[in-house]
Image (cartoon, rainbow, N blue to C red):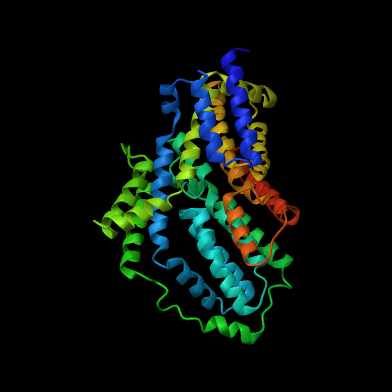
Amino acid sequence: MSYYVCAALIIFVSCYAMIISERVHRTVIALFGAMLMVLCGVISQEEAIAHIDFNTLALLIGMMIQVIVLSQTGLFRFLSVWAAKKAKANPIRLLLSLSTLVLMCSAMLDNVTTVLLTVPITFTLTRQMHISAKPFVLAQIFASNIGGTSTMIGDPPNIMIASAVPELNFMSFVSVLFIPCFISYVLTMAIIVWVYRRDLRCEEKYRERVLNMKTGGLIRCPIMLRKCLLTLGLTIVLFCLHGQIPGWTMESGTVAVTGASLLMLLTMPGRTEQLEKIFAQVEWTTIFFFIGLFVLVGGLEVNGVITWLAAQAMSITQGEPMATMSTILGLSAVMSAFVDNIPFVATMIPLIKNMGAMGYADLEPLWWALSLGACLGGNGTVIGASANVVALALARKEGFSVSFLRYMKLAFPLMLLSIAISWLYLWIRFL
């Protein structure tokens, strides 16, 4: 084993271990590891830059900006109160209404932003009704991860896969992932309602409090809201057109940044202070984490480590489609439940590509197995996805906490159920 291979493995494994331990912020570790790759000669500066997927970064930044501007309009608060009133403040109907709202928003917007905006409103509603917020928060966590799985832009792993595999466009993700996500969502909500059926009861006098809440004035800026919906709708239409029109060459990152820049042009021309606030809220730590991660994986790739791993995977499964797909789906789910799914997916993408280069016939089922496993696996534990961590942190501020094991006791079997549904669906559709 050469010096460069050894150095690449030591740096990558050490960084991965540090990221899992959470002793140092993952962005700092990823960037420092990336610089070590360059300084130790594992990868040249030119190769490092070439391995950074700027399309993924552009897609993330563009969608983040659109969500940040949209959140300032008050739309999420309006929708939550409106959903509660439509549900007649019935606890079960309210849980399903709010969870479905989170599901739909997470399919098109950032998961973390969605729960940040909906969970506090959920606490307001449950306090008014004198019922436990626990089943509502848990349902919204599951809904956010399932919703994010269903589209190309809903979850970072899907964004990364779409960028790496241009033939998988927006409509491909929706057409393939909608059915397993929908079935998983319906069964998950049914089980949560059954498990917490005793907590989902409310006296009539408290229901009246929610029914008397007014939706007027919750939309702070109707003009800005219309502009946000216009640009978001245009962005999604362009996503849908990608791959449907012969000769269409505009990548998803270009579409997202076009929508974001158009929105800023329409809402804040010449307003320097507002513009600076928008850019200050972009999750730059996530963006730079991706940059460091791309270079770390690039160090493995240029030194043949990824190719070697692909060969080992091929030898284990003998290239048999069912065994290979099942292995990737199961491994992705279990790994993503306990470690960050972003570095895992970043490692798996070139590995699957190398399997194709070695003669594996049809890679498409493997991409969908990776997507479903990595995204739905996040539901399995407290640390499985960023939305889980954020929602439960908000819950602690409200006075109740869910331990790692208590959460896992409910969530891990639900995650396995969704993976079993995904496995059956992929087997029927592709194999």
Q: Residue 47 in the image: x percent, y percent?
A: 44, 22
Residue 347 located left or right of residue 250: right
> Which residue is at the far bottom?
205
Residue 246, above or below 142 = above
Nearer to me, 119 or 40: 40
> Which residue is at the far top?
2
Q: Residue 356 in the image: x percent, y percent?
A: 54, 25
Q: Quadrant of residue 195?
A: bottom right
Q: Residue at x 51, y 70 (%)?
A: 80
Q: Residue at x 38, y 71 (%)?
A: 220
Note whether residue 125 is visible: yes
Quadrant where the N terminus lies?
Answer: top right
Circle count: 0
Q: Residue 41 in the image: x percent, y percent?
A: 50, 18
Residue 202, above or below 103 = below
Note whether residue 368 is visible: no
Residue 404 located left or right of residue 107: right
Nearer to me, 377 or 30: 30
Q: Residue 348 in the image: x percent, y percent?
A: 57, 32
Q: Residue at x 40, y 46 (%)?
A: 61
> Which residue is at the far left?
270
Residue 275 located left or right of residue 102: left
